[in-house]
Amino acid sequence: MVTIQDVAKAAGVSPMTVSHVINEHPHVKASTREHVLEVIAKLDYRVNVAARNLRTGRTNTIGLAVPEIDRPYYGELAAAIIRHASAFNLHVVIEQTGASRENELDALALSRKLMYDGLILSTVGLGPNDADLLPVDYPVVLLGERIFAGPLDHVAMPNVDGARAATQELIDGGCKRIAIVRDNNASQTGMSSLRFAGYLDALESSGIPFDPELSVHVDEYSLASGFDVGMRLANSGLSFDAVFCITDILAHGLLRAFATAQVAVPGKVRVIGFDNIEQDQYSVPSLSSVDPNHDLMAKTAVELLVSRISGKPRTDQRDYVGSFRVVTRESSSAPAP
Amino acid sequence: MVTIQDVAKAAGVSPMTVSHVINEHPHVKASTREHVLEVIAKLDYRVNVAARNLRTGRTNTIGLAVPEIDRPYYGELAAAIIRHASAFNLHVVIEQTGASRENELDALALSRKLMYDGLILSTVGLGPNDADLLPVDYPVVLLGERIFAGPLDHVAMPNVDGARAATQELIDGGCKRIAIVRDNNASQTGMSSLRFAGYLDALESSGIPFDPELSVHVDEYSLASGFDVGMRLANSGLSFDAVFCITDILAHGLLRAFATAQVAVPGKVRVIGFDNIEQDQYSVPSLSSVDPNHDLMAKTAVELLVSRISGKPRTDQRDYVGSFRVVTRESSSAPAP
DNA sequence: CGAAACGATGGTAACGATACAGGACGTCGC
DNA sequence: GCGACGTCCTGTATCGTTACCATCGTTTCG
């Protein structure tokens, strides 16, 4: 392996000068720089990142812990985060936590092994009781719900407002019996509860009573669960004229179930989701949704993390709650005559 | 920061003993181990990964370079690779190359900076002329086409056979005018050409003449392109009774276009894709596809890479070509009476 | 009973880069 | 003419860990 020493020797300068050239420090004569660069090219020298990391105490790498990277929502988020991180010369390591509490904590532990300069953690499994386990002295940005009282930076979706607007969209379409599909996590702080709260809000302000029978539950956010719940609803004998799925992936599973069960959407039942994943535009029918502006969330999270990494003191814990807009598509529109 | 020295001092042993404990070396008395572990826990000591990397020359991290992580195919692949890599205690850094040649080369360069122990490279942008740029002395597994003559390990999909089988599925369904949607990359070695070859094969062995008008092209593999091409086909006035899309993502865009243009699938036109992404089961209509067994490919790629990393000489460059099966769903089945 | 083998521990020297401090030289201002 | 400052370059001392080898008991076995 060719080291910085070898380059220095071959170029007739000190290792420090080579280092200065590599790191684009000023105060290196143009001719020297050229020459060193030539030698670097000739010897095919590559910096040893491990050595640099050890010396500088930085890795230029951040961790991104998400439940599963093959869910479209997280895929799109990860893509955006990687893109924004690369603007700061940061690499991104993806940890799949499978929404398990242990794995989320593992990701944190890794960060603190100095493997990452910081961590963006999409919490799903952690609960309020885990607040103590979170490091205060380490750059972490939580993406998702504000579960903790602790002083951590936080980028959240407009869950309550978005869900209220989604429900309102259905109400505005004349629907009165609006089912909601959510997960059965009892936590009061999770996404599910927040979106449920928005749904209740919207019902209440329109004077529509909430029917507990119309709140149906899934175990996980997947197409398969959405399909199951769609089938259950279709065959339940319940009367309903709309469904709000708290994530798009559930909605797509449910749409498929309704197609199979011959429940016309939007003819008989209107459907709306949340997340505005790309697929929404291309399903049959296309899916109305709440667009939380992934890209901006990703950008915000990265910037927040970068500012922590570069040493901003944690005195001012910051919360960012994104904006949203409702995107109306076929699934919640009046059917063509 | 608490170092191994601090632990050693506090435990009354040498740093080496602590190191042995951490790395689970044998020949440490159980009581000593216990005690050291206690001290580690008490001091909240964490290994400094950078120092370890420097000393051992390994990072326990591999790179995965894919065009875009938010495409379902790559998302599913990445999820599988991360899962399999973690069985070897390897972390995965994802680089998005955007299918550009430069970025693919960059990913390689990073690897050689010893940032990664090895690289799984999903080539799309590189061409046969770039063979020289590929390192022979570095663990790399190519995922995708065998573009290079060079001695690199390689995990490929059964492109030709899979495409032949997909086309045959349509022929078996009685179709005679079968369109193909592929990209307009002229390279003879790329996925597009291979799948096209399989398509031609199938036509020929059934004595169906190939009509160049039925070969339509896209710029990229995306829902949007699939939609465009679907619209173009629907409005082209061409007569066709089936479409083979060389990736599922194109097929889903196309299905949506056909829904919009009121081209009945499978009633009027049958459609089949390639990749068998999860979404295929849940679209309306559900999409027939060729399943290349992602998970096995991911497993193979990781294992191949691991064997190179652990020093197997590169004398026996290995090619692995996966198996496949055709999954028949609504889009290529006789419509319900 | 002595030699060999083994189990448990520790000393030393890197791994390859950069932080820091400082030296040599030239230029500028007054 | 002389100090002050800026430019360009270099020597030294680590960063925290593990590889390698040595050491010292203790056990085993012929």
Image: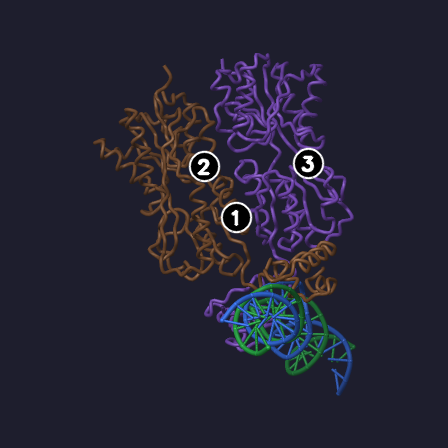
Chain colours: A purple, B brown, C green, D blue
Regarding mark 3 in the picture, which secondary structure is present there?
loop
Q: Tell me the residue that label 1 is attached to.
A: B87
Q: Up-down: is B141 above or below A277?
A: below
Structural crowding at the residue carrying mark 1, measured as other residues with C-alpha within 10 Å and reported as few (<14), some (14–19) or many (≥20): few
| Amino acid type, label 3 | Glu
Q: Tell me the residue that label 3 is attached to.
A: A145
Regarding mark 2 in the picture, which secondary structure is present there?
loop
Q: Up-down: is B23 above or below B186?
A: below
Q: Is residue B53 left or right of residue B198?
A: right
| Amino acid type, label 1 | Ala
Structural crowding at the residue carrying mark 3, measured as other residues with C-alpha within 10 Å and reported as few (<14), some (14–19) or many (≥20): many
Q: Position of residue D21 (x, y in %)?
A: 56, 74
Q: Tell me the residue that label 2 is attached to.
A: B222
Q: Position of residue A134 (x, y in %)?
A: 71, 46
Q: Residue at x 51, y 19 (%)?
A: A258
Q: Nearer the viewer, mark 2 or mark 1?
A: 1
Task: Report in which chain the residue with disc 2 lies.
Answer: B
Labels 2 and 1: the sequence-earlier one: 1
